[in-house]
């Protein structure tokens, strides 16, 4: 329950909704009680009028007695109608305040979680899967909303109604009150249990539905592989299985739901029978009038729903507490990547790694061992190495996705930790290894890195990334939508959109992480030449498996298993005749073989 305390700040924020809502609940309950009292008066009036009516039998006055009775009943009926109307009006206000408050809190909480997610480091995203992140911001928040909305509303209503009605009933007749209320706790308990079963089964359904959608999503994003390997029938059968599982779970839920209403109706019926029986005994004893029986039946009906909702409210609160616990778990996760001095300034692009070692926090893998190198402002550095040698890790450290385990990384002579994260990252153009495009237009994808960008700048970036010719061939040009994750573009086109996005923001440091792997050597050369022009006065880091990417760089370092094997210029390394030379010769041979095959 203490987990729900996180929401108190929101109750404070929306205190007027809560206070007004409570007042509306009390007033609407008051207007609910009035008809019951009026019904008692009406019954008693009927009894007395009938006695008088009989006594005047055969006299002229008899019809007058009837007229008086009829007009009194009319007024009482009108009173009931007005009370019902006013109750309805105040119920409307009650929902307009409390349920509206719950929607505001839901909105605020979602924003709070989303904002917090964004501040968390990459390691957090590696530890938690996307499904879990999404579930906490959608399903868990919805469960919490049920607590701040309906549960609070029905809880206050229940409390105020009990406080008003039960003492009133006792003041009329304690024995009848006790008997008519006996089945109600039973009702509350059974609803609590049935509701728990319903919730558990609903959760199972939710889980099988999410399995089903994950399956479908994966099947469609991998549709190329599915078709190429002719696995459609197999995938069909798998879908059938997942779908059947969902159907079975839904049928099981329908069984319990079918029990819900008969149970409530049965217990209400029991209360009414007890009220009529004990009420009749009391009438015979002369302690109450018959009108009280009718009045009590109304009270029992009035109390039934709130009592029934007690079981429901309890299970909502339990579930909300569990959901809020999960949400708090994420909200209490703090990012260890924080700025020490919030330094925010324009950088020149001087990067220095000093004896840097790095272990990935989750796997414990040592990706870099005592790495040292330096890039002066405006210089370009190529990092060449085999798979898993630690090249992307260097890019991750420069973008401050992680902090070094040992050694220091400085930018313009200042430890990278001193800079504000936004300040560093906004001056870096990063082209990641696994290109990610948003399902938007090409122009929007290129302009993504800036708050606003002129069309001319978008076109210039596309031209520099050697993309213009391709775009001109699309019927909608820059307004071509790239489909989910860029499915409508070729691998090389996607890479070049990603490069255009990075250079469009005119970064001080540009990092290309194996960004030219999907383009041929000719395009690679064209892009690198354009890059040399654009990056004049800016620092660039070109990560690649291919020696051909290193030719134009001012400096080259060769990595192997997290260690810098060789460093120098392309020519120096070739002349040295070491590992770089070996790789160069091997790649030269395979390239000429490829050309021969063509
Ligand atoms: N997020 C991660 N969590 C744990 N270990 C990682 C993570 N990313 C990379 N590694 C490990 O760190 C080592 C270096 O990986 P890195 O991605 O830097 O290599 P790379 O040289 O860029 O390889 P490639 O050229 O294949 O992309 C590898 O052994 C890899 O398994």
Image: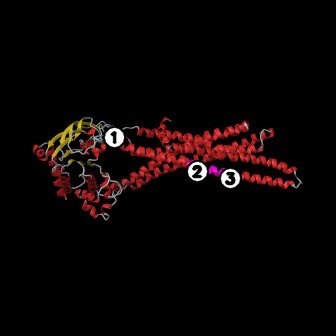
Report the predominant secondary structure element of the magenta stretch: helix
Callouts 2 and 1 close, C-beta under 8 Å: no
Q: Nearer the viewer, residue 574 or 283?
A: 283
Q: Is residue 90 magenta?
A: yes
Dot 1 surroundings within 10 Å: few (below 14), some, or many (20 or more)?
Answer: some
Does residue 182 appear in this view?
no
Find the distance from the CA under tag 2 to the CA under tag 1. Answer: 48 Å
Q: Position of residue 235 (x, y in %)?
A: 41, 53
Q: Nearer the viewer, mark 1 or mark 3?
A: 3
The residue labelled by disc 1 is 123
Residue furthest toward the bottom? 475
Decide: is 278 above or below 444: above
Colour mapping used in the image:
secondary structure
Q: Is mark 1 within 8 Å of ligand 1?
A: yes
On the picture, is 318 further left or further right than 551? right
Q: Going from the N terminus, do you reach mark 2 or mark 3 first?
A: 3
Decide: is 340 above or below 551: above
For residue 81, the mark is 3
Q: Residue at x 71, y 37 (%)?
A: 171
Q: Nearer the viewer, residue 558 or 147?
A: 147
For residue 152, the mark is none
Q: In this picture, which residue range is highlighted in magenta? A: 82-95
Q: Position of residue 93 (x, y in %)?
A: 57, 49
Does residue 262 appear in this view?
yes
């Amino acid at each position: 329950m203490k987990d729900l305390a996180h929401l108190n700040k929101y109750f404070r924020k929306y205190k007027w909704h809560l206070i007004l809502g409570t007042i509306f609940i009390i007033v609407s309950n008051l207007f609910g009680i009035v008809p019951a009292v009026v019904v008692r008066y009406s019954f008693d009036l009927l009894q007395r009028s009938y006695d008088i009516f009989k006594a005047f039998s055969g006299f002229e006055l008899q019809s007058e007695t009837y007229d008086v009775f009829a007009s009194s009943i009319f007024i009482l009926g009108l009173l009931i109608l007005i009370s019902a109307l006013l109750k309805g009006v105040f119920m409307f206000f009650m929902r307009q305040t409390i349920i509206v408050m719950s929607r505001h809190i839901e909105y605020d909480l979602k924003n709070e979680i989303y904002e917090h997610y964004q501040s968390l480091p990459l390691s957090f995203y590696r530890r938690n899967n996307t499904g879990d992140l999404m579930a906490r911001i959608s399903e868990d928040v919805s469960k919490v909303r049920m607590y701040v909305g309906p549960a609070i509303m029905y809880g206050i209503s229940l409390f105020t109604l009990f406080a008003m009605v039960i003492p009133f009933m006792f003041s009329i007749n304690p024995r009848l009150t006790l008997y008519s209320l006996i089945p109600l706790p039973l009702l509350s308990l059974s609803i609590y249990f049935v509701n728990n079963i319903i919730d558990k089964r609903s959760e199972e359904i939710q889980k099988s539905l999410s399995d089903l959608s994950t399956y479908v999503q994966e099947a469609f994003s991998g549709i190329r592989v599915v078709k190429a390997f002719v696995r459609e029938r197999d995938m069909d059968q798998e879908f059938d299985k997942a779908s059947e599982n969902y159907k079975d779970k839904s049928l099981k839920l329908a069984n319990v739901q079918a029990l819900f209403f008969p149970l409530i109706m049965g217990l209400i019926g029991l209360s009414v029978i007890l009220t009529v029986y004990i009420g009749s005994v009391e009438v015979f004893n002369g302690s109450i009038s018959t009108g009280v029986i009718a009045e009590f039946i109304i009270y029992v009906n009035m109390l039934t729903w709130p009592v029934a909702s007690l079981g429901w409210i309890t299970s909502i609160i339990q579930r909300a507490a569990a959901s809020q616990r999960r949400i708090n778990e994420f909200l209490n996760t703090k990012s260890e990547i924080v700025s020490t001095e919030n330094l925010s300034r324009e950088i020149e692009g001087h990067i220095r790694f000093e004896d840097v070692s790095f272990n990935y926090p989750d796997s414990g893998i040592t990706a870099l061992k005592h790495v040292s190198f330096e890039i002066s402002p405006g210089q370009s550095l190529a990092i060449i190495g085999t798979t898993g040698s630690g090249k992307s890790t260097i890019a991750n450290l420069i973008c401050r996705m992680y902090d070094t385990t040992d050694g220091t990384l400085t930018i313009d002579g200042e430890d990278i930790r001193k800079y504000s994260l936004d300040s560093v990252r906004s001056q870096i153009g990063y082209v990641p290894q696994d290109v990610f495009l948003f399902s938007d237009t090409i122009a929007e994808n290129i302009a993504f890195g800036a708050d606003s960008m002129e069309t001319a700048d978008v076109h210039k970036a596309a031209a520099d990334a050697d993309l213009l010719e391709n775009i001109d061939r699309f019927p909608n040009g820059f307004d071509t939508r790239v489909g989910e994750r860029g499915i409508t573009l070729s691998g090389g086109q996607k890479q070049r959109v990603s490069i255009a996005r990075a250079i469009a923001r005119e970064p001080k440091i540009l990092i290309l992480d194996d960004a030219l792997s999907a383009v041929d050597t000719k395009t690679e050369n064209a892009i690198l030449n354009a890059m040399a022009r654009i990056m004049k006065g800016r620092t660039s880091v070109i990560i690649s498996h291919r020696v051909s990417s290193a030719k134009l760089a001012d400096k080259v370092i060769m990595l192997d298993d997290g260690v810098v094997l060789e460093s120098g210029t392309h020519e120096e390394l070739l002349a040295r005749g070491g590992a770089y030379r070996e790789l160069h010769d091997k790649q030269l041979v395979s390239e000429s073989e490829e050309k021969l095959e063509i």
